[in-house]
Amino acid sequence: MGKLGLLILALAAPLGLSAQGDTTFVAQGNPLFKYKYTADPGALVHGDKVYIYAGHDECPAPQERYVMNEWCVFSSSDLKTWTEHPVPLKAKDFAWAKGDAWASQVIERNGKFYWYVTVEHKDIHGKSIGVAVSDSPTGPFKDARGSALITNDMTTQYTPISWDDIDPTVIVDVDGQAYLFWGNTQCYYAKLKKNMIELDGPIMPVTLPRFTEAPWIHKRGEWYYLSYASEFPEKICYAMSKNINGPWEYKGILNEIAGNSNTNHQAIIEFKGNWYFVYHNGGINTQGGSFRRSVCIDRLYYNADGTIKRIQMTTEGVQ
């Protein structure tokens, strides 16, 4: 990393380090976390806090490749002062995985926290989805199954590529049924059993126009929203339905190309009465980019008919 990059990261370093290894700092606009590179955010609202779970981009400049070995977790009660907690999960914590801590999401059910992650499988060619579990949103987490939940050989009838089983997102519907969505070039979904670590039915394809990857499922009122990264470089588009099984009606672009990053990955949450759009860009100058990304957050607004207004990405962030 160049001198300028080191200076930027040093100036943005956390304010305090606790005996437990937590670090606390005040975010200065977007990106939120300027002292390390973070990507593919998943977000969880639990109690009076927001938790952001992100992959750690570790590729040193001037190299241009993905180096991701672990996930990070940050929490805040006001979206301004943030605490980073000790690394709660690494790709190597899954004995059957050989690396690549890609996109993930944490969801709570019955007092336990389930972390659905993308990793590279040791023995089955291609990307796989695993599940870790903890009694705390900050971990530590451990492998909940001892094996992958989704492997590449389970979806070859839909696409022959080896990287289509990535980017898991999970929702527990109002009737208690949990669903897992994921995919690259083809979106998939399946029911989960109440234990949250087994499928409860067949894998089914979802038809979405110009789908690339990064699905995120959420619900507001009577509407289900399925947002996703589209084309390449990626924009975020979305579709709506009144039934989680579809059909899904395409509603257009939600977020434009995120500056200096070919990828785009989102989480959508409601927190203390407001809605927020969490994403990444390559916005740390001059060392940022598609392999050294940074998490950001901006407000999200709905129209009267339930559609979502186009996201306005800002350097000021949430005030």
Image: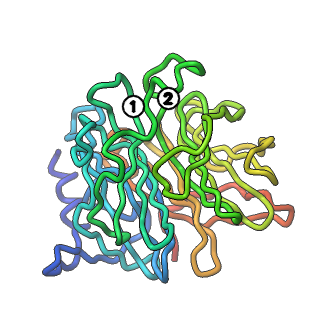
Q: Position of residue 76 (x, y in %)?
A: 41, 77
SS category of the residue bearing label 1: strand
* Placement of the N terminus among the 4 image quadrants: top left
Give left or right: position of 201 versus 11: right
| The quarter of the displayed image where residue 54 is located | bottom left
Give left or right: position of 139 versus 267: left
Give left or right: position of 276 versus 118: right
Q: Nearer the viewer, residue 208 or 113?
A: 113
Q: Nearer the viewer, residue 102 or 203?
A: 203
Q: Position of residue 302 (x, y in %)?
A: 75, 64
Residue kind at label 2, given as amino acid type: Asp
Query: Which comes sooner in the sequence, label 1 or label 2?
Result: 1
Q: Position of residue 68 (x, y in %)?
A: 27, 42
- Residue at x 34%, y 24% (from the top left corner): 124
Q: Residues within 10 Å of mark 1 (few under 14, many from 20)?
A: many
SS category of the residue bearing label 2: loop
- Residue at x 28%, y 56% (from the top left corner): 142
| The quarter of the displayed image where residue 175 is located | bottom right
CB of mark 1 within 8 Å of CB of mark 2?
A: yes
Q: Is residue 25 above or below residue 196?
A: below
Q: Position of residue 262 (x, y in %)?
A: 46, 36
> Which residue in the structure is indicated by mark 1?
127
Give left or right: position of 85 versus 185: left
Q: Is residue 136 above or below residue 166?
A: below
- Residue at x 54%, y 35% (from the top left corner): 183
Q: Nearer the viewer, residue 207 or 6?
A: 207
Q: Tell me, what colour scheme is on the image? A: rainbow
Residue 164: numbered disc: 2
Residue kind at label 1, given as amino acid type: Lys
Q: CA distance from mark 1 to mark 2?
A: 7 Å
- Residue at x 63%, y 33% (from the top left corner): 211
Residue 74: numbered disc: none
